[in-house]
Image (cartoon, rainbow, N blue to C red):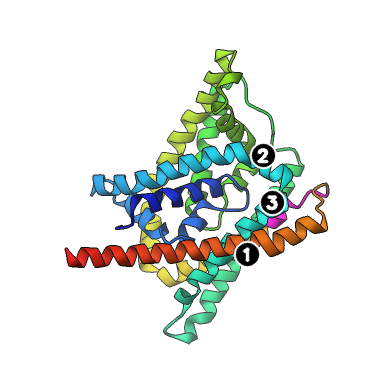
Amino acid sequence: MKEKGISLFLKGIVIGIANMIAGISGGTLAFIMGIYQNMVTAFANLTKKFWPNFLYLLKICLGVAVGTLLCSLLLDHLFDSFLFETVSFFAGVLIGGLINDAPSLKLEKEKKKSKYIIGMVIAGLVVIALAFVNIFFTKEGVDSNERWRNVTLYQMGFLFLAIIIGAIAMIFPGISGSMLFMIMGIYYPVLNAFSDLLHFGMYANPGFILDELKIMIPLVLGGALSLIFISKPIKMLLERHYKMCLYIIFGFVIGSIVSIYIINFSDIENQFSILHLCLSLFVTLPIGSLCSIGLHKISQKMKSKGSEDTKKS
């Protein structure tokens, strides 16, 4: 956990943005950027070595908060004007992550490879199946693009439980918490709450602020509880079945690349021109891949430099 604070903060911003986009998991991006296992370990050991783990997580969490707020401001505009380009950029980030971590899939015993590949295929199919489930529920009208007003205790309780489920999903690489939020009908109320809190001028009615706080409180509490309690089982799985977990995570990532397109282009009204298609395939998708590969190389250099400085001191 010797990585510099600014690097962790920037990676946190990427995770925060990813968490807000249906089809992408923040856990996936954490895995691709090489901080997933350290994050899980820090959460699991929070009670043992509080301050080092707390400070490590704080840098990431601040970035996540900034990324979430930025995304809530920019997401509507980007998806309205540059849907295919935006989706392709994040698909490129995922592809770049696969390229970065492909060497880690090498096995000492090739005979066992079949069971790992089966696990990877099943994981990918699960994510793709969830994308189709998301489409079914949103078409059935479960999702609501409206703001919650006069928020009741029942809505707060439902939101608390839904956030726990979604936050647990966000921890698992490949399972999109935003996608589950859409299925449960809380994605837009949460997104709108973040966006509204950044536009203070609209609050002529103080009751609106209270409504947003009633959404934010269960959001924060549910997220914190799920992160603390689920991290230890994940840490145990990574320690005991690392290779299988790695192959399953790769399956989740591959499934995410497919599902992000399935979710965002399921509506027949989402038409795009040849120009948008060319920009996406030949500009934003490669840029996303290069950003992912470049960030990985910079991170590796910073880690190696940090270890050299530690040895010298």
Query: Quarter holding the C terminus?
Result: bottom left
Query: What SS does tag 3 mark?
Result: helix
The residue pinned by badge 3 equals 133
Q: Which mark is residue 76?
A: 2
Toward the viewer: 242 or 59? 59
From the viewer's perspective, is the residue at label 3 or at label 2 nearer? Answer: 2
Q: Is residue 268 above or below residue 258?
A: above
Mark pair 3, 2: CA separation: 23 Å
Q: Is residue 265 magenta?
A: yes
Q: Which residue is mark 1?
A: 286
**What's the mark number on residue 240?**
none
- Left or right of 52, for residue 282: right
Disc 2 marks which amino acid? Asp
In the structure shown, which secondary structural element does the residue marked by tag 2 occupy? helix
User: In this picture, which residue range is highlighted in magenta?
Assistant: 260-268
Horizontal and vertical percent position of residue 237: 40, 62
Question: Mark 1 or 3 closer to N-term?
Answer: 3
Mark 1, residues whose alpha carbon is within 10 Å: few (<14), some, or many (≥20)?
many
Which corner quadrant holds the N terminus? bottom left
Percent position of residue 28, x then y: 51, 57
Q: Is residue 150 visible?
A: no
Identity of the amino acid at label 3? Val
What is the x, y in percent for residue 160?
Answer: 50, 34
Q: Earlier in the sequence, mark 3 or mark 2?
A: 2
